[in-house]
Image: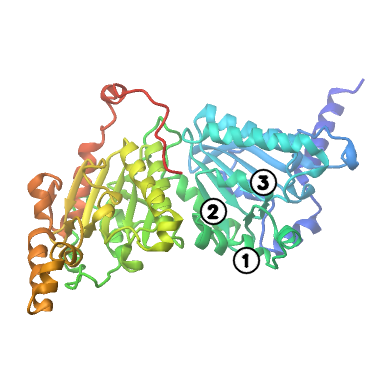
Amino acid sequence: MATTKELLEEYQQKRQKIVQMASSEAIEKRHKKGQWTARERIDYFFDPGTFNEIGLFVKNRTIHFGMDKANVPAEGVVTGYGMVNGRPVVAFAEDYMAMAGTFGEYHGIKEIRAIDFAKEMGWPLVGMNDSGGARLQEGMDTLEMYGNLFRAQIEASGIIPQIALLMGPCLGGQAYHPIMQDFIIQCKETGFMGIAGPAFAKTQLGEEITLQELSGWKAHAVKSGQTHVVAADDKDALDKAKELLALFPSNNREMPPRVETKDDPERICPELDTIIPDRPTQPYDMYKVIHAITDDGYFYETLKDHARMVITGFARFNGRPVGIWSNQPMWAAGTIDIDAADKGARFIRFCDLFDIPVVALGDCPGYMIGSEQDWKGILRHGAKLLFAWADATIPLISIILRKSYAGAHYGMLDKGIGADLVFAWPTARVTIVGAETAASVIFAKEIKNAENPAETRAQRIKEYSDIYENPYCGAERGYIDDVIMPSDTRKVINRSLDILEDKNKDRKAFLAKPWRKYSNINL
């Protein structure tokens, strides 16, 4: 029988062998590629000395195809919990140096346990993805465990924030793991995500394409709209994840964390009084408005490179985290196409799930028209915004800066679709359609038969514009709560957030609504 000393020494040896992960040469080779090991990522992410590992000694049970002799430290994934900037977080980091971080039965069990633990504790989850994909040697056990993993993620969705980091390859079934989390941060040079890699594309479709073209950051941050934030490297990705977590509550029962600020909530922004050009078709940069009104000009943008005619991201007002949904007149005049609608709807729904108020900054001539958008389903996609606004229970504040026409009026949040408070600048043009469009329909016959059609057309356009293209018609009907000076926007938003702070404190009215599972959103 072994002595206590021998048992302790055996324990130390077993632990050290697993923690060591790989040879120093292999680790150095990885560093030269600009990547950290899984444990280095964990060490950097968590506050020093706070990480507690779960499942260090877990081992696969497969014996086929050499798996009985395989050494896969910690089953290719480090899981555990600790403190991040003083708040508890659960994380897992896939270890590419352990059998390429492949996903097998017990690798999956460890990740599922991390997700379930995070949900039970009410702590955010961060996944560091770096895996060669499915562990084919384990056959059906691997296949079935993917389904269990996806279900665990879905059951935790909306209860705790979930952030995925793409720090290495993430292909095949493995890619569904990060895509179902709330936000994806992708390393620019080393992170890849796709339903299948270039080899499969060539074999099955005859398509010649590189991994970077097919699954790199441009594929998802720009084209597909699946990567929310692009990071330079491992360190930058982890820093960006920490920054994002600081804006979120730990779970859906807590309020977002408020911080102290020295930026006066009543601060006037005089530069906004001259930001709107005299010519209504001339663009201006909405980022200047956002940076002017937020605490210290801070703005954490998501999906920056996708659907650039709209802007989504997080800011603080008087220390409160707030979501911002805005048009960008500098890009396609701020119109809403199918990608923009999807981008906005999912952002609004995330904010609603975690009690983060949303401020809409509107300057939108309408939803994108034309055969291409119609055939791709602009009506279906555009309706997602309407569902998101109408279902939301968080404080909703709308600021109309300039154009607010047709369907975009409620797509950008109006009183009818669910805004708590609506404010307009004197430069706002709020009506069913623009004056030129209205005149071409209402007065078409008159203009056609006039002695001077151009003069008659110009006269009717001016008449319609003078009557309807302003914020006062809406204000007279109570659809707009007040017309404000642009320079007062920050002050007005902060005062509005103050009075809406306890919007959901008394849930009697909310609970009295007819029971339903959920709205049938136009997916």
Amino acid tagged 1: Glu
Badge 1 crowding class, 10 Å Cα cut-off, few under 14, some 14 to 19, many 20 or more, is: few
Q: Position of residue 90 (x, y in %)?
A: 57, 37
Q: Is residue 159 above or below residue 383?
A: above
- Location of residue 188 with respect to 243 vertically, above or below: below
Q: Secondary structure at mark 3?
A: helix
Residue appearing at x 45%, y 56% in the figure: 376
Residue 110: quarter of image: top right
Instruction: Provide the residue designation for mark 2.
Output: 185
Query: Disc 3 residue type?
Result: Gln
Q: Which residue is mark 3?
A: 174
The answer to whether 158 is drawn above or below residue 285 in the figure is above
The image position of residue 144, as x and y in percent, is 71, 34
Q: Quadrant of residue 118?
A: top right
Residue drawn at the location 24% of the way across and 55% of the way down:
406
Residue at the extreme right = 1
Residue 213's mark?
A: 1
